[in-house]
Image (cartoon, coloured by chain):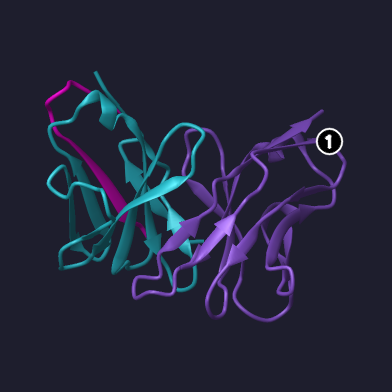
Amino acid sequence: AQSVAQPEDQVNVAEGNPLTVKCTYSVSGNPYLFWYVQYPNRGLQFLLKYITGDNLVKGSYGFEAEFNKSQTSFHLKKPSALVSDSALYFCAVRDGGATNKLIFGTGTLLAVQP
Amino acid sequence: GAVVSQHPSRVICKSGTSVKIECRSLDFQATTMFWYRQFPKQSLMLMATSNEGSKATYEQGVEKDKFLINHASLTLSTLTVTSAHPEDSSFYICSARGRSEAFFGQGTRLTVV
């Protein structure tokens, strides 16, 4: 079965510093990986995805993620964090079944201090 | 990008009543929509997959008679929480699958008193 793991419940970073939110995956076949962000009491917003191609994927709001097949990781990164980046981040993998449903990680709360 | 509209954003209802939540894809047709439930500080739990013109597929442990799903058109799916109880209080989120990624509604905060 497809799954993703987010080992950190919370990541704290100072504004202006680089940030990394970790995600590892376990899939059979080719992985379709996604990152979403959720602000309080809101739905999820799509950040970026990896389907195939370049291992470095660039997404919305200056975020990027690196697909690493050997380490089965898909960490989310940003060179310089903003206070407004503070939110809940979810890594997800697409299930290979007929419905292509998304399977989410447990989420990582990113707190950026001014 | 594609927009999914979910309504209402907040609802408070009395125990024993039913509540309907709507999920609309505004600028694309969605043959498949998904309904999630999210508990505080937790991840999204998939409740069911809604298929246009056919019965929904429920995840294990989700009561289909309690959480009624109707996907009557390519742009609208509804979730009805029947005979709501306080333990049904939660954040419900719908999602519609586009060509390559899923788009999410704003979520509905349901409080049953």
Query: Residue at position x 66%, y 48% from top?
Result: A7
Q: Secondary structure at mark 1?
A: loop
Residue B113 on image: x %, y %: 24, 18
Q: Could you tell me residue B64's position as x and y percent?
A: 16, 50
Residue B95 relative to residue B84: left or right? right
Q: Main secondary structure of the magenta part?
A: strand
**Front in this rendered view, residue A105 or B101:** A105
Q: Which chain is purple?
A: A
| Residue A69 location (% of width, % of height) | 71, 74
Q: Which chain is cyan?
A: B
Q: Residue at x 49, y 38 (%)?
A: B42
Q: Which residue is mark 1?
A: A15
Magenta region includes residue B16: yes
Q: Is residue A70 left or right of residue B112?
A: right
Given residues A39 and B90, the one toward you in this image is B90
Give the residues in magenta: B10-26
